[in-house]
Amino acid sequence: MDNALLQEELREEIKEGFKVNDLDSANWCFRKMNAIKGKIDENNRLADEEVLRIETWRKKENEDLKNSMEFFESLLTEYYMKQREVDKKFKLSTPYGKVTSRKSKKWNYVNEEELINYLKENDMDLIKIKEDINKTELKKVFKDGVNQTTGEVLPGVEIEQIESITVKVE
C-alpha cells in the first residue's frame, strides 16, 4: 500500500466495546473501512497477477502435452482402422490402454418445424411444452398479491416487506 495515511489507519487499534456515537466516530469507522478495503483490493490485485501468471504457464505446458496426446491418438486410431479392414473383429488392448469402437445411430433434425407439425397432425404426444410464470407481469396484475380488477387474493405466494441497508465506503 503506497498511502502512509492508510497504513496508519490499518495499524490504529480498535478498542474493545467501541461504539459510534457521533459524526467523528462514524467518520473514523469509514476511514478504517476505507483502509481495509484498500488492503483487500491490494491483496486481490496481487493474487490476480499471480493467478494469471500461473494460468498462463499451465495453459502453455498443457497445450504442448495435449498436442502430443492427439498425435498418439491419431497414430493408434489409424493403426486400429487398418487392422479392422483386415479383420472385422480386431481388438487393440494392451496393459496400458485399449482402442474400442461402437456403432450408434445419430439423429440429425434437419427441419424441426416440419417434424413438430407432423407430430401435432398425427396426435403424437412427443412435444414438450414448458410452463413458466411471467413474474414481471404477475406483479403488475396482482399488486401486493391482489388482483386489481377482481379483488381476488393470489394463492401460492407470500409477500413480505423487506428493508435493505447499504453501507458504502467512498
Image: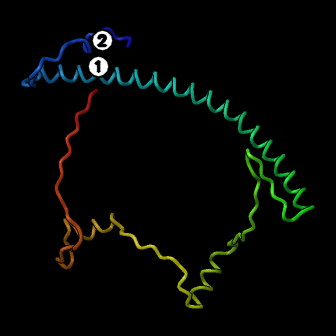
* Label 2 to label 1: alpha-carbon separation: 7 Å
Left/right of residue 131 with respect to residue 86 in the rendered view: left
Q: Is residue 25 above or below residue 59?
A: above
Regarding mark 2 in the picture, which secondary structure is present there?
helix
Q: Callout 2 environment at 10 Å: few (<14), some (14 to 19), or many (20+)? A: some
Q: Which residue is mark 1?
A: 35
Mark 2 and mark 1 in contact? Answer it, CB < 8 Å: yes
Q: Callout 1 environment at 10 Å: few (<14), some (14 to 19), or many (20+)? A: many
Question: Identity of the amino acid at label 2?
Answer: Gln
Q: Which residue is mark 2?
A: 7
Quadrant in which the N terminus appears: top left
Q: Is residue 111 above or below residue 16?
A: below
Question: Identity of the amino acid at label 1?
Answer: Ala
| Image coordinates for residue 37, horizontal then vertical, percent | 31, 24
What residue is rendered at 18% in x and 23% in y? 29
| Image coordinates for residue 30, horizontal then vertical, percent | 21, 24
What residue is rendered at 75% in x and 38% in y? 67
The residue positioned farthest toward the bottom in the image shown = 122
